[in-house]
Amino acid sequence: MKQGLALCGGGSLGAYEMGVWAYLRERDFRFDVITGTSIGAINGTMIAADGYEVAKKMWDHVTVEDIMKNGINFDRDLIGEIDLKKGSKWKTFVNSYIKNKGANTEPLEKMLQEYIPPLRVNHLKKPKLGIIKCTFPGMKEVKVLVNKLKDDEVVEELICSASCWPVFPVRHNKKGSFVDGGWRNNLPIDYCLELGAEQVIAVMLNSLPVAQKQELFDLPNVTLIRPSLPEGSFLSFKQNAIQMNILLGYMDAKKRFGEYRGIRSFLKEDAFFRKTTRAFYKSFVQKDPVLYAKTVEKKKKDIVIQGVKEDESLLYLLLMEDVMEECEIPFLEERTLKDTLDLIKKALPSLKGKTGFSAFLREAYKGSPKKVNEKHLPYLRFIESL
C-alpha cells in the first residue's frame, strides 16, 4: 500500500514537522508520495531526499536574519522592539518592507540555494514530490511536481510556494507572479492522494491561513498529527521556540501512534494509570451518569481531541489537565500518571486567589469547599479521587 506524507505551511512552525519527521524516521517510515505547502514544501523536499542531517542543521541554526534582511521576529515581544528612531532595526525593516512591497527575502533564497540543490531531489524517481503555490492576482492553486523540474527551477518553485504575501513580496519569474500556496491549500492531503498515496500521514500546523479542506482529516486512510499545545508565532525564528516545537512535534507523533496517553499531557500508560482512571470512571458514572455524559460532551467541544483514544480515561485526563494548567505544571514533559498526581497534590495547597477556580481547587483539596456549582462539580469528583 502506497504511503503518503502531507505537510502544512506555517513559517517557523515548520519546526514541528521536523520533530514529527524525527519520530517517523525512528519508526522507519518510507513514503511513496510527499506533498507540502510553503515551509511544508521545503521540509518535504528534504524528507524526499532523506536529507535529515541537512534539515537538522538548518533548523538548529536558523534565525530571522536567515529569512529576512533586517528581519524582525513577530511575536509577543514585538512591541518592545518598536523604535521609530532613524537607523533603528525596526525603522530599517519598515523602510525595506515598503521599498520591496514585502520583507526582503534574499537571505531565505540564499539559504535554500545552499541546502537544496545538493539534494538533487528533482532527479528522484521515488518518492513523488508535489508542492503548492498560488497565482497572483487571482489566487489560483497551482500544483507543481518537483520530480519533473529542471535543476535551476527547484529553489525558485519552493520560494514561490513559501512567499507568504503580504509579509513576503509577490514572487515574479518567467512563469508569472506567485504567492504562498497556503492561500488555497495549506495542507495538500488531496494532492497527496491524487499522486497515488493510499494512506496519508498529514501534519497540520496552527498557522495562517488555517488549513483548508478539513473534511479530509476524517478520512479513514488519513492519520492526522496536529499540535496539542500552542506553538507560538509563525513569524518568530527564535531558537528556543523552534526547539520547543521540534520537541512538541516529536512527542505529539509518539502520542498519535499510541506511545503516550493524554490530550495536552504526555503520560506513559501503566497499571496505575489503568487502575486509577477506571476507578474514577466507575465512581463518577455510578454517582451521576447524567453529569458525566454532559461533562464529556462539553469538554469535547472545548478542545480538539482528534486522534486521542476516547475510552474510560478521557474525562479523567481532561479534568486533570485543567488542574495541571491551574497549578502551572508544564505539559511538555514525559511523566507517569502517579508522578503527575504527586505534582498536583504538592501544588494545590499553595494555589493563590481568594475566589475563582484556583480558590475552589485549593479549598476542595483541603476538604472544605464552599458552594459547589455544576461547573465545578466534576473537578470536585477529581479532587476527591486524589
Image (cartoon, rainbow, N blue to C red):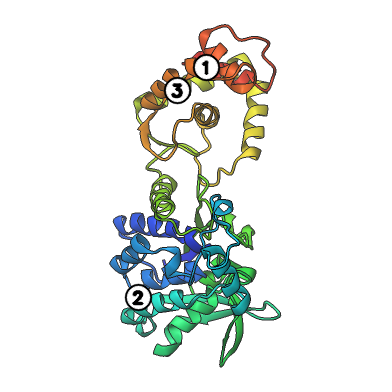
Answer with left or right where residue 131 lies relative to residue 299.
left
Q: Which residue is mark 3?
A: 344
For the residue carrying disc 2, how many other residues have a C-alpha within 10 Å: few (<14), some (14-19), or many (20+)?
some
Closer mark to the observer between disc 3 and disc 1? 3
Q: Which residue is mark 1?
A: 383
Regarding residue 3, the answer to whether it shows in the image is no
Q: Which residue is mark 2?
A: 115
Tell me if residue 88 comes above or below residue 171 in the rendering: above
Tag 3 near tag 2, CB within 8 Å: no
SS of the residue under disc 1: helix
Which is more N-terminal, label 1 or label 2?
Answer: 2
Front residue of 273 and 356? 356
For the residue carrying disc 3, how many other residues have a C-alpha within 10 Å: few (<14), some (14-19), or many (20+)?
many
Regarding residue 274, the answer to whether it shows in the image is yes
- Expressed as whole percent of the image width and height from the top left, the position of residue 325 reads 52, 31
Tell me if residue 105 comes above or below residue 186 in the rendering: below
For the point 58% across and 57% down, the residue is: 82
Query: Disc 2 residue type?
Result: Tyr
For the point 60% across and 40% down, the residue is: 303
Instruction: Give how far apart the Cα atoms at labels 3 and 2 are.
Output: 46 Å
Tag 2 near tag 1, CB within 8 Å: no
Instruction: Give how far apart the Cα atoms at labels 3 and 1 are.
Output: 10 Å
For the point 53% across and 72% down, the residue is: 162
SS of the residue under disc 2: helix
Tell me if residue 230 comes above or below residue 105 in the rendering: above
For the point 39% across and 89% down, the residue is: 151
SS of the residue under disc 3: helix
Tell me if residue 376 comes above or below residue 222 in the rendering: above
Instruction: Give how far apart the Cα atoms at labels 2 and 1 are.
Output: 53 Å
Front residue of 196 and 382? 382
- Expressed as whole percent of the image width and height from the top left, the position of residue 378 reads 61, 21
